[in-house]
Image (cartoon, rainbow, N blue to C red):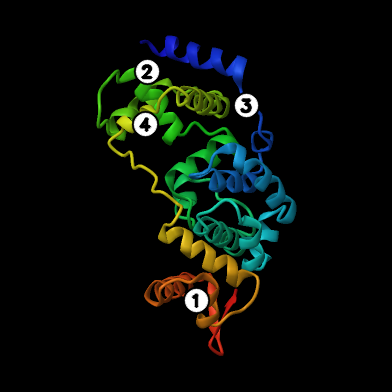
Amino acid sequence: MTTKEFQKIIRAHYKKHKREFPWRKTRDPYRILVSEIMLQQTQAHRVLPKYKSFVKKFPTVEALARGKLSVVLNEWQGLGYNRRALYLKRTAETIHKNFSGKFPKDFKTLSSLPGVGPVTAGDIMAFAWNAPVSVIETNVRSVFIHFFFNDRKNIPDKKIIPLIEKTLDRKNPREWYYALFDYGVYIKKTGNPSRRSAHYVKQSRFEGSHRQKRAQVLKMILNSSYTKAEISKRLGYAPEILSRIIFDLKKEGFIQAKNRRYHPL
């Protein structure tokens, strides 16, 4: 398939089936950052109401930087992976403190911010500033595997990236990536080509997992302060499991201990 043929198919689908989201209607790098962090490992229909609520509560990078962590985490409840909220706040604090509230526009600096990394940095540059950067994430990966790799398996990203660069619309990368994302969502309805990627990792089950137990402990502490015995009585977790969870939450900066009670930060 030629580059023009591929682009024609992707653009035709986007013209007829493009999805509308509030984060696609803004050029504010802060709001794009919020949406990108939320969309990591969470589907767009679940993100939509939380995004609207979150940016209403924290409309600017300064508001998030100055916000109390416990309030940020409470606003995040329902999205899971609470580390994302912690990293998002730390990124806001870094931008507010080190860059006078203005987002750095170079890829290397953006990628170094807490919880951002190369994919999110690329998305911010493309969507906020229409920069022609190469971005590979799950939907983009699925599209290129679907069109260019037939039934091959264990396809490494290093084989896909040259194709992304070759087919990139350098005049309007913003709309091009929106189109790729939407086509990726479309083809996943009949199968998931990204499973043929060498980098594919199946998401672990949440119900009954350590991740669920950790989330429940944090949710409990966010609303008040408790001793370890009170948490154990309420949730019924084995002492060694609860001790590990509390140790990790303290170490990572989610909670603090005072007078043998655990409090939100």
Tell me how far mark 2 sits from mark 1, CA to CA. 52 Å
Label 3: which residue?
Answer: 19
Give the amino acid type for the residue marked by disc 3 in the picture.
Arg
Mark 4 surroundings within 10 Å by alpha-carbon count, few (fewer than 14), some (14 through 19), many (20 or more): many
Label 4: which residue?
Answer: 194
Q: Earlier in the sequence, mark 4 or mark 2?
A: 2
Q: Earlier in the sequence, mark 3 or mark 4?
A: 3
Q: Is residue 4 visible?
A: yes
Do residues under tags 4 and 1 come within 8 Å of each other at their CB atoms? Answer: no
Q: Secondary structure at mark 4?
A: helix
Give the amino acid type for the residue marked by disc 2 in the picture.
Phe
Do residues under tags 3 and 4 come within 8 Å of each other at their CB atoms? Answer: no
Q: Secondary structure at mark 3?
A: loop
On the rendered structure, is 71 left or right of 85? right
Q: Earlier in the sequence, mark 3 or mark 1?
A: 3
Give the amino acid type for the residue marked by disc 4 in the picture.
Ser
Tell me how far mark 4 sits from mark 2, CA to CA. 12 Å
Quadrant where the C terminus is found in the figure: bottom right
Tell me how far mark 3 sits from mark 2, CA to CA. 21 Å
Name above or below for residue 69 compared with residue 46. Answer: below
